[in-house]
Image: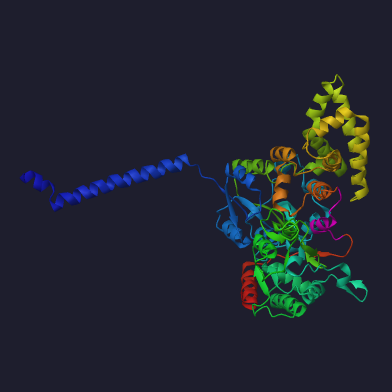
Amino acid sequence: MENFKNFFSIKNIKKISILFGLIGAAITITTITILKVNKKYKPAFYNYKSYINESLIDKFNEKFEYKTFNEVSEFTAALNNFKVAAGIGSDFQAITLIKKGLIQPINFSKLLKLQIKNDEELKNILKKIYTPDVFKHLESYDDQLLEDAYGNKFEKPKHLWKYFVPYYAQDGIIAYNPLKNNNNILNKDDFTKNNIYDNSISNVLDTISKNNYKDLVITDAVRVNMLYGSTEQKNDSKINENNYKQSINDFINTIENSTNTSISSGNYISFNSDGQGIIASLLDKKRIDVNAAIMYNGDALDAYYSEGNGFTIYDNEQKKEIEIPNGTIQTIKFKNNILLVDGLVVAKGINSSLEDDLYSTLNSTIYNDMAAAYNNTTIEHYQLKMYDEYLNNLYRDKIITDYNNKNLRGVLKFDEFKSELRDIYLKGLKQEFNNDILKSFNEYVMNKFNNDETLKDSLFETLDSSISDEEKIDQISFKLSHIDFLNEKYYEFLEDKYPNYVNFDFINYTPTNIAEYELIKRNYFVNDDNTFDYKALEIYQISDQDGSIVHNSINGVDDKLDSLLTTYYYSKIKH
């Protein structure tokens, strides 16, 4: 008994506690070590929030840890602290990163799967791949890349296009919701001054404000808003320590003078950095504090295609709540605009193995088939190839089988059918946005069916049997007149072979790759009645060609100036 008591003496209890503590610590360390060994370290890939189709994130997470940010400064901080391998940033940010030596040139041979001999050859390849406006935009930064962040001249000129791969582009737009203002829809004449259409941001805001669109939400992007102000007031848009306050004041004066409202009062004018939040506030009937917005064109396109966004109105005829119809949101692009290009940058010093993983992942996701414009003789040739694949995917097997079942040469019959369709489609490529050519598909289908019962029966069987023959012809003509990205069967094919197009459907921002840009422009904006949606096309397109829109770029700034202008901006808008 005495020995038993001695065993539980205070001295022994302390020894036992220490022993068990050491054993517990050893178990913990061993467990953590095993977990670390089993869970392989993955380098980070950064992107803006809600800027990729969710189906593609899993592919990134196979080799990387996919992370999102709200402000581009978060990505910059990660690069500064060597916590990221690569990611999607912005053009003006990339300028600063190049000057600070934080990013390395893109390995375009791996990304494009091409042998590239020198910079001149690379430049010519990229000029074929990007839209003209985007490549011109990238070149415009050359004069900002003559020296590093410390004022030392570079030995050789640097070019943004060597360090940066465009992802999507954006410009600015003013939108309003007529459902929140007695269905008051303005027309082009309402923006005319002295018999001249005036789409300056000042006149557009003044006009909509006088028509009771006073509850304005503005995309809260400091540098973008500064550019809107300085270009509207015809001041220098290239920011430095001497003019940044003037630029911010220009923006505030532009907004306040054209809306007759004080920003700092908090009445009527609000700011939101989240594009999805702006869309929601513009569409939501409960948000009586917002009936107009200054937003990016991609967000405006998302709002324009309002069905599926989860917001409703009461329909008096149907006597029930319905989704806000597509095309409800009205938009105006203003003259002194911005071209903001987001794109890939790669952290300096990543090893060859990690580089292989990176470009392999990008090739199978957001930069899939990036060299399409270079690898095809013309954009028309590429579009015909894609249209060909679309027809094969939707109809080839069924049509061939149905002909063969009647002892007719199925392959030959299908190829004849496809060849005739390709000829009509090609006419549409040569006569852009011609509704008559879209309608000619209806005429073709009716004539074809009158002379070919087998084809008619084969295609009719793919549709709901309860609808009329006339409706069936309309639906088939619609499917044949363009590449229907939202066709369920074809969408599955896209997810597997062309995930970049599935990505666009989720994001709605304007592609920078000319092959994607042109294919989407021709095919995505076709209404159910087989006509082009010209309003949606106007939102989508980014071009200076007709002179009604002038796209300006944001210059890079150092950390000190960035801090100064950000502090001053928020002190002035007080929100």
Q: Is residue 572 above or below residue 108?
A: below
- Whether residue 451 can be seen here: yes
**Quarter occupied by the C terminus:** bottom right
Q: Is residue 105 left or right of residue 130?
A: left
Q: Is residue 455 left or right of residue 80?
A: right
**Stretch in magenta:** 530-544
- Whether residue 164 can be seen here: no
Task: Decide which of 333, 456 is in the foreground and name it.
Answer: 456
Residue 532 lies within the magenta run: yes
Q: Is residue 175 above or below residue 536?
A: below
- How far across and how far down the image is residue 96, in percent? 67, 62
- How far across and how far down the image is residue 265, in percent? 65, 80
Residue at the (68%, 74%) spot, across then down: 269
**Quarter occupied by the N terminus:** top left
Residue at the (71%, 77%) spot, across then down: 252
Rendering quarter of residue 183: bottom right
Residue at the (58%, 41%) spot, across then down: 62
- How far across and how far down the image is residue 516, in percent? 78, 47
Rendering quarter of residue 479: top right
- How far across and how far down the image is residue 401, in percent? 80, 24
Most distant residue in the top direction: 407
Residue 318 lies within the magenta run: no
